[in-house]
Image (cartoon, rainbow, N blue to C red):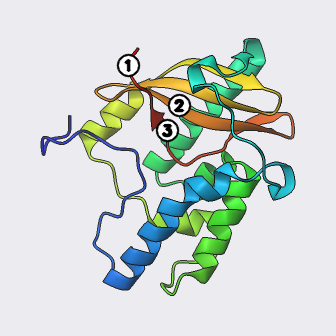
Amino acid sequence: MSTDGQKPSFALVSHAVPPAPFLAAALFTLALLPLALAACGEDDQPVQSAPETPGQFGSELTGAEARQAAIALRGYLEARAEHRWARACSYLAKPIRRFLDRAAARSKRPLGNDCPSFIASSTRKLLPSERSVLDRVTVDSARADGDRGYVLYQVPGDGEQAMPIRAEGGRWKLAGLSGTPLAAS
């Protein structure tokens, strides 16, 4: 719990309140992001979404592949918490980086025209209590079918979440900006 009594969140949130037109555009863009990315496959071609839940998807990754998926998640979360924007973007799959580059370039707010600029402008500074929660995030497993999968992880106070991943250049990259809470079973 944060000191203000609210649960910590790793969602992209601005600390300062931006002008209303930018806020509306940013919220609209972020609301459409999962839909846009879910429809992108290799080279941004539409793909069918999997009918299984993340915990049942494909098969469990082991060894180096499982470690790489966990490193991608932890690295991304830590880079955002440390305001290392380019490093945070380095853990994201190409379709997400391209989407954020385009969103930043279209913004009327002077924030830069690339993924690091977009993430920097839409991430607020973490409170010490939120950083403490981030340090206690644990990766339970990673599952994949071909070049797509999920990292399943625990966020203290928020339960199990799933972050989509995608194989790129022999490494797992995040195919989302934040995890999806999973229903308790």
Residue 103 quadrant: bottom right
20 relative position to 179: left or right: left
Residue at point 41%, 49% (across, down): 11
Alpha carbon distance from label 2 to label 3: 5 Å
| Disc 3 target residue | 179
* Callout count: 3
Q: Amino acid at mark 1?
A: Ala
The answer to whether residue 48 of the structure is visible from this angle is yes
Residue 12 quadrant: bottom left
Alpha carbon distance from label 3 to label 1: 15 Å
Residue 26 drawn above or below residue 128: below
User: Which quadrant holds the C terminus?
Assistant: top left
**Disc nearest the viewer among 1 and 2:** 1
First reached walking from the N terminus: tag 2 or tag 3 = 2
Q: Position of residue 14 (x, y in %)?
A: 35, 64
Q: Position of residue 2 (x, y in %)?
A: 20, 40
| Disc 2 target residue | 162
55 relative position to 98: left or right: left
Q: Amino acid at mark 2?
A: Ala
Badge 1 vs badge 2, beta-carbon distance below 8 Å: no
| Disc 1 target residue | 184
